Amino acid sequence: MGTGVVLDPRGYVVTNHHVVSGVREILVTSVGGREYTARLVAHDPATDLAIIKIDPARDMPVITLGSSEDLMLGETVIAVGNAYGYENTITQGIVSALHRAVQVSDAQYYEDLIQTDASINPGNSGGPLLNIDGEMIGLNVAVRAGAQGIGFAIPVDKVLAVVSRLLAEQAGSSQRHGIQLAAVAVLDADSSKIESIEPNSPAALAGLKAGDLIVAVDNQPVARSLDFHRAMLGRKAGEPVQVTVRRGDEALDFSLSLAEAPAASADWAELVWEGLGVELEAIPAEQFRRTFRTRYRGGMSVVRVRPGGPAAEQGILPGDVLVGLHIWETLSMKNVAYVMSRPDISEFSPVKVYLLRNNDVLYGHLSVSMKTTVQR
């Protein structure tokens, strides 16, 4: 059991990674009693955050976001969640401490948490911690075993920074705009400022510049980076997008046409063979669903393993199915190419790998050969 917070009216929900990790099916019940089957969109085990998606018949209400930057000790907070399965349990307390580092178990370590004495119990994980204005200022994450009245939450500014990155990567797998926003999640004057523009990208050709402050996408207000990345979700290459920015004292409108995401060329088979030490073959979606009982949506079958390569050293075998690299699913060679071509791959290398062997999920780490990766 766990709790989630709706961040987008189309049904994008943030929760804790440990709530949805290793389960066969994610079942979601809304406050109105409607039940949904959710799919895992993206996850970041390091921060214990995950984004899931449900498909509501109509737009869902979205939580009001606050900031954790100005929290004060003693400030009143309210925790909401499914404590021990008691739906919509609300407890009240105060901010007891800030910037706590907590070792919850051998597998779970957190940094920079909010400590509160609002009662947080199993089932509260992934639920909001609110201030007295009803704004989310944290995401409830953990209780200290053996302690009474001590709970912890991830600061909302950190949650939004991670969620913004995950949504940007999700949108970037289907189209490309060329806009890189400053890494700021707090609601302030710089939270949607363009940090850089990719050369020859749709944004560059449209005339957008570094330093522009995005204020709207297709007339939808943008107040923080999260708003921009949400606006780009579900869009396809070739789709026109109107971006309104503030440049100095001027409000300017730009129209750009989204480009194709970087495609995996035939050369990627050789690069994956050299870099990861495997030959991969896509599994048709219907065949994957018939063969495996799993929450994963698809994968790439391991056809051959290169002796002495990274995969061989990790014990990967022909017949295994690659379903994920780091925080991304691997439904096709295009997905694998996306991970290997990321300019920041060195920051998360060795890359965590997720495999299916029969119906068991296996985990490991692969050291990618950097000389074989291609920069976009």
Image (cartoon, grey):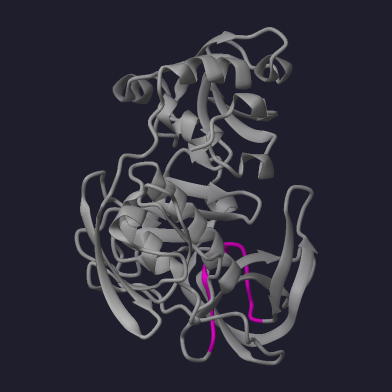
322 vs 22: above or below: above
Q: Residue at 64%, 91% (x, y): give it.
A: 75
Magenta span has 123?
yes
Magenta span has 67?
no
Start and end of the magenta stretch?
A: 118-131
In front of the other: 376 or 338 = 376
Q: x and y percent of residue 303 in the render? A: 51, 9
Q: x and y percent of residue 69 in the render? A: 62, 81
Q: Residue at 44%, 54% (x, y): give it.
A: 168
Q: In this rendering, would 315 be left or right of 78?
A: right
Instruction: Mark yes or no: residue 301 visible.
Output: no
In front of the other: 2 or 368 = 368
316 vs 12: above or below: above
Image quadrant in which you'd find residue 335: top left
Image quadrant in which you'd find residue 194: bottom left
In front of the other: 93 or 17 = 17
Q: Residue at 68%, 37% (x, y): give it.
A: 349
Q: x and y percent of residue 136 in the render? A: 50, 78
197 vs 213: above or below: above
Q: Residue at 62%, 40% (x, y): give it.
A: 345
